[in-house]
Image (cartoon, rainbow, N blue to C red):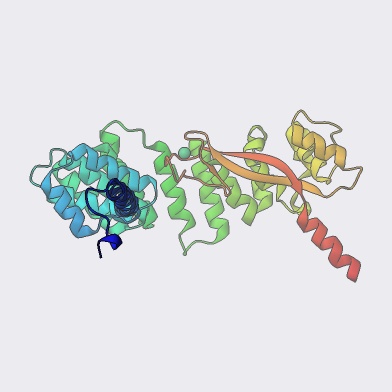
Amino acid sequence: MGTFFIEFRDPLFSVIIFFALVFVITFSSYWWGRYKSKEDSKNLDKFLRQFRTLPSKNELQVLISSGELSEKSWLLLAHSYTQNGNYEKAIEIYNELLKSTLLHNKKETLFLLGKTYFKAGFLERARQIFLEILKKSPRTPQALEYLLLVYEQMRDYKAALEVLEPLDTLGVDTKQEEAYLHSLMLLSNANLTNDEKALKLLDIYNKTYQLTYMTFEFLFKVDPKLAWQHFDSSKSDLLADILWGLEAKNLDLDIISKNSFLRELYSARGDVTLAQTSSNFELDILINLQQTKLNATLHFEYSCECCKHVAPFAFHRCSFCHAIGTSKVEWSIVKDYHKDFSEENNSFQ
Ligand SMILES: [Zn+2]
């Protein structure tokens, strides 16, 4: 019997025990390592998941009331949400902050809430917030300016004009705003004919010498003859896109022949041959391309002279900085797909 078992004093027994121990330790440390890395990965996923999903309204309520983060941190977070277009979350933060009794900057937070409501398109709520600020602090020009913008967006131009009075008493220059609001009110008046609107718009323009683009955009649309009569050649480049889009039958060749920019512009379009070159790069290329009959035209975009924001469409008030009449038209050469399309259609006839 004894021959089948190794005695514990036998050196071979010690060797077997040693290797068994090595095996158990290696095996358990391997599995422990795998288990740990799995747990670490799970924890990291759990941690990162918090940032993929935004905190719910209830979570925000608990977090803000606990006071773990400072007021400034919450305001910065709300600002960052607004910058990213998540107005809903920013509004939730502002509303929760306003519920807190420990809030130091109540007026400023209310103003930020009003601004966010305005940006998100909740005009009535924005109006109420700005009126609430003005009830307690009537000498707040920023709130008045936003209230004016709210009324303008609501197309309540009469109410917007009423806001100008307190702004004026606070020393804010409101002449341009006044002319702009009167012009908007005029253009939206359904009881006036286009001819009446054109004359009244011209009247505002002649008194203020502002809103050139807005005035001539409407005049060239409804009465090109009247527009040319009152056309100020020195402002031709401001209206380059409107002039470029005019139908050939509506051109006034007398005026065009007397102004160098207009000569170059319409020579580049191919209506006249009154300029051989231009100091403007794009117009110069288009004038030279006239002989080759290559399909090219001008493409326009608009930048705000105040904040440099670029838009694909002309604007009278910048949607970013809210300045009036700061739109600057810029042009580049593109392929004339419209001409290509008309030529293709004609070839099938
Ligand atoms: Zn701007």
Residue 277 appears at what percent x and percent y? 83, 31
Q: Is residue 310 left or right of residue 5?
A: right
Q: Is residue 206 left or right of residue 142?
A: right
Q: Quadrant of residue 103?
A: top left
What is the residue that sits farthest to the bottom in this orientation?
Answer: 349
What is the residue that sits farthest to the left in this orientation?
Answer: 101
Residue 261 appears at what percent x and percent y? 73, 34
Q: How many marks?
A: 0
Depicted 310 relative to depicted 34: above or below: above
Q: Nearer the viewer, residue 216 or 348?
A: 348
Residue 251 appears at what percent x and percent y? 76, 48
Residue 348 in view of the camera = yes
Image quadrant holding the N terminus, namely: bottom left
Depicted 308 relative to depicted 35: above or below: above
The residue sitting at 56% across, 59% down in the picture is: 194
Image quadrant holding the C terminus, namely: bottom right
Q: Is residue 281 left or right of residue 227?
A: right
The residue sitting at 17% across, 47% down in the picture is: 97
Q: Quadrant of residue 121?
A: bottom left
Q: Nearer the viewer, residue 187 or 44?
A: 44
What is the residue that sits farthest to the top in this orientation?
Answer: 279
Residue 139 in view of the camera = no
Q: Is residue 94 left or right of residue 337?
A: left
Residue 305 appears at what percent x and percent y? 52, 34
The residue sitting at 77% across, 56% down in the picture is: 337
